[in-house]
Image: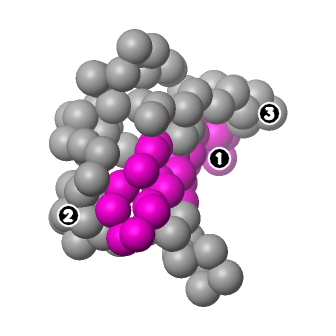
Amino acid sequence: MTQEMMSRLKPGMTKSQVRFALGTPLVSDVFHPDRWDYVYRFQKAGVLTEQHHVTVVFENDLLKRVEGDVVPASSDKPATAAPAAEEKPAAKVE
């Protein structure tokens, strides 16, 4: 999950456009078809060194908002560094 990938996201994109920009979501729940979750974890020597979680939310099959610890560059909040495994701050972009 890179800042470049996130900067490709624009409100109103279709699900196929989001899938092209970010790849296939890790979690696609049949009970919440308008929510996709992307999780990135990097471990080095068995120790978690980097973790990102991004949720994209659709409305009427179009991208409505992006939530998580990596946000598009066009937002008023800058992307944050990966939090420690026990911390989970969330930023919302609409």
- Identify which amino acid the numbered label 3 is placed on: Glu
Residue 33 sits above or below residue 10 on the image: below
Residue 69 is a magenta residue: no
Magenta span of residues: 37-66
- Residue 56 percent coordinates (x, y): 46, 54
Q: Which residue is mark 3?
A: 86
Give the mark nearest the N terminus, 1 or 2. Answer: 2
- Residue 73 percent coordinates (x, y): 29, 23
Distance (Cα) linking label 3 and label 1: 16 Å
Where is the C terminus found, in terms of image quarters? top left
Q: Is residue 88 left or right of residue 24?
A: right
Give the mark nearest the N terminus, 2 or 3. Answer: 2
Q: Residue 85 lies in what quarter of the image?
A: top right
Tell me the number on the disc at residue 17: 2
Q: Residue 86 lies in what quarter of the image?
A: top right
Q: Is residue 37 left or right of residue 7?
A: right
Observer-side mark, 3 or 1, equals 3
Distance (Cα) linking label 2 and label 3: 32 Å
- Residue 33 percent coordinates (x, y): 53, 77
- Identify which amino acid the numbered label 2 is placed on: Gln
Observer-side mark, 2 or 3, equals 2
Badge 2, how many Cα within 10 Å: few under 14, some, many 20+?
some
Work out whether residue 2 or residue 90 is closer to the camera in this orientation and state it.
90
